[in-house]
Amino acid sequence: YVGNTNGVMEFDGERWTLIPMVNREIVRSLAVDANDRVYVGGYNAFGYLDRDEFGQTRYVDLTPRFAEFITNPEFADIWDTLVTPEGVYFRALRQVFLWNPADDSVRHWQHEGRFGAITLTDAGTLLQFRGEGFRVRRGEDFVPLAGTESLSGLIVGLVPLVDGGYLGFGVDGVWRRLDVDGNVRLLKMPEGMPPSSEFNAAARLDDGSIAFASGDGLLYLVDPLRHGMQRFKLDPGFLSGIYPTGDGGFLVSGNSAIYRVSWPTEWAVLGDEHGAEGSMFDMATWAGSEYLLSSAGAARLIPQEGAPPRFETAEWGTKLAYGLIEIDAERALLAESHKLILVDRGKRVELGDGLIYPRSFLASRFRPGRIYVGTESGLRIVEVKADEVQISGPDLLGKDLGVIDLVEISEQELWLGTRRQGVWQVHLDANGAIDRQQRFGPEQGLKLGVIGMAGLLRLQDGRLIVSTHEGFFRFSEGRFEPEDMDGLAAQRNPEELLSLAQSPGGELWAVGVGRLFRRAESGQWRLQSVGGLRRGAFEQVHFRAGGGVIVVASQSLLLLNPHTDGERPSRPQLLLRSVARALADGGRELLPLHPEQAVHLPYADFGVQFQFALPDLAYPRGRAYQGRLVGYETDFSEWSSARAYLYSRLSPGAYALEVRARDGSGNISAIEPYRLVIDPPWYRAGWALLLWILSSVAILGWLVQSMIRRRTQKLATETRRLESMIKARTRDLASANQRLELMANLDGLTGIANRRKLDQFLEEAWRQGREQQRRLALLAIDVDHFKRYNDSHGHLAGDQFLRDLMPILGNCLRRDQDLLARYGGEEFVAVIPGADSQTALAVAERMRSEVSAANLGASISIGVASVVPGLGEVSELIEAADAALYAAKHAGRDRVVAAPETQA
């Protein structure tokens, strides 16, 4: 909840909602009680927020309860709102109002000399009467607190200290300590701390330190007892408020944004200001020292007492360095851009017969003195025998591989992960020469993606895991099988390669270009909140000898506090925010949010919309949702960022909505199932059916008698009429069922077919194409730089963009048997039965040019594939179109690329 100039802004993790004050004026203060009721101090008004049975929040004004005390309605701002055992205080400049929610009683105090800070202490509620000092609540009134007479000027706030005292800051700029017995003394603050008059708000944090917000956008973090202080610029303007969140951080309101600050911080950042220069590749340990390997060379990390460490470039490592591995305390191998260097007692010795292009190292566990060297072309072997260091001849594979990972299974078996050609298994003879080699790919179950990059890790439990742009795969009995990695696979983004690393103690990490995961002791993967700290792409995870971790990014290093366990102090819970009937005229009718029994609705032409949210402020980009409507579908949807579901024209029956949310740490929470019953129309009710049966019997008897009396010709005429009526009714019912099915398979945002309808349509089109040997074309459509569009224009504008895009794409499909569907996010699919590549390519190019001419603010790229369905799977068609789409993206976007025509 955030006070602003018109009321209170409510944020549930997904949506901002304005709750206006009765007078549409500014809100100055907020407080919350043990029952999560929010109290509001505004301008000439104060009260609290109340949520009705439909989940809607409204402001309840308490000002009229104090009509007998308010002689002038212009009592101005409520600067402080405080919840105490005796009730809720609302402090204005010259008046203080107290409302007790337990018995609805009210109290009032007035002081023409003006009031100051108010706070709750172990000794009771303290209130500053300016010009006199502080008073403490005793019984029914405030009595002077002896010793505080010197505090006559405005004290803006009192912040509790860990030892029981209170830190006061005010307009005179002096820092004071106030004890509840009335003892007041000056308090020495850390060197560089501004006068207390520079600050507008403060709060004590979980670790006992105090955060101060200043008027120039600076945030100060102070330990007043240990005289420590940190500060950093948070906002270009005024900082107005601080509030601890209880989940390992605190919120700060500024002029331009609301900020969440993690504290105590798990991470520290090292960059060029600490001597870490160049593009960074890796870290390594040699002879008890840690070295950074970067485009600037090799630099030793030098710890400093009471200050961040610094880096100093080694004399032997002034050129670009990719890696370093220890031979012994005096010797190491250094991988430079082109050459392999032996560093021997500070001197450089070039190894090999020219350009080697070394990139990675692995010391053999089975052959002491052997070091494997991964190169751009393949593999070299270094043998260390006493003072002699020898390297093998030309690369043992001699291919353009770019070896990035090495795993040794035995003295004879070695695995290589490469940057361009997937995974290789090599077998060595007794002399270290390769006598057998095999490349693994799709034929062995290993999906590589277009680039062919593959990372390798052998876990301590013996599993050999490969990471690619298609996911994780485990080697078993000569093949690779998909691997879940304890739920990490489900948290991957499409085409995201997450490289794995395991510490000597068994802790697992996963690093992608822009995301970092850590598996906590609970077994759950936690997305690390380091987006604002990272500079450049993540490269490697380095495990320190003392148990810490250094994450290498291309432009910075992130140091993890070794005493953190990665577990969150609290876990956000999924909230059902609203349930509403979406009426045919565009209106909405709210339904009870938490009904004790199932909600009954009559069968009619309407939809039911469910909105939900996960208030995860620590990891806002890591949340995802999935759901199902039991009675309508059996399986949960795929994880997605969709925060609302719309079900249209549900058939009569009982339903239950189940929704689950996954936060950035991988924790799962769920709502209580929302139960809903669509009652049948009156003509399908039990009594109506019984009446219909009885009526039918009576009519049937009458018809029998009529048939006996009437002539054969009239019987035939009547029979034909009845048959005509039945056929007409059958057509009407079929048409109605078709409309129901269409509504149930529409995407709620864009109004086109959803993923469920796409899967059904593709399966049937594939079957028909196989039976008729008829081509089937698929267009994979993606909005270029849609995330950038969302970030610059906002998510509402992004949603409108997708809605505006649909008519353009749909008008390019002219046949009823073609289908346009939303595949997910900003990805769409068009299915064109009977179209070859040229026809599909023409449709795709028309789509692209029409979108370009519409000037919507973003272009599209399209991948086209056309096959004759055979014994293969429809997924092959999707993969072919997806590969063509990737090629279109890679070629510069705003273009169409077709895959070769094949038989599937």
Image: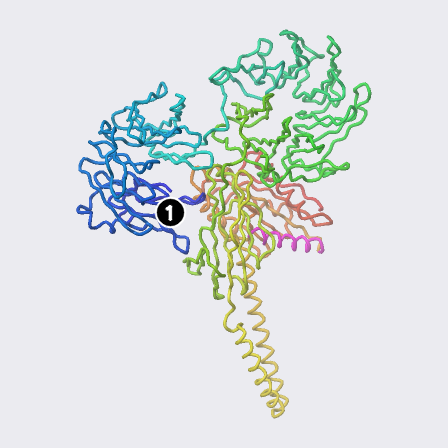
| Residue 471 rendering spot, x and y as whole percentages | 64, 37
Magenta-colored segment: predominant secondary structure: helix
Total marks shown come to: 1
The foreground one among 425 and 551 is 551
Image coordinates for residue 553, horizontal then vertical, percent:
54, 25
Q: Is residue 777 magenta?
A: no
Quick one: SS at disc 1?
loop
Residue sitting farthest toward the bottom = 709
Q: Is residue 282 visible?
A: no
What segment carries the magenta color? 754-771
Q: Is residue 468 left or right of residue 806?
A: right
Image coloring type: rainbow
* Viewer-side residue, 286 vs 774: 286
Task: Give how far across and how far down residue 853 sits, in percent.
Answer: 47, 43
Viewer-nearest residue: 169 or 584 = 169
Q: In the rendered view, tell whether residue 255 sits above or below residue 820.
A: above
Dot 1 crowding, Cα within 10 Å, few <14, some 14–19, many 20+ = few
Tell me residue 419's x, y (percent).
Answer: 65, 28
Tag 1 residue: 37
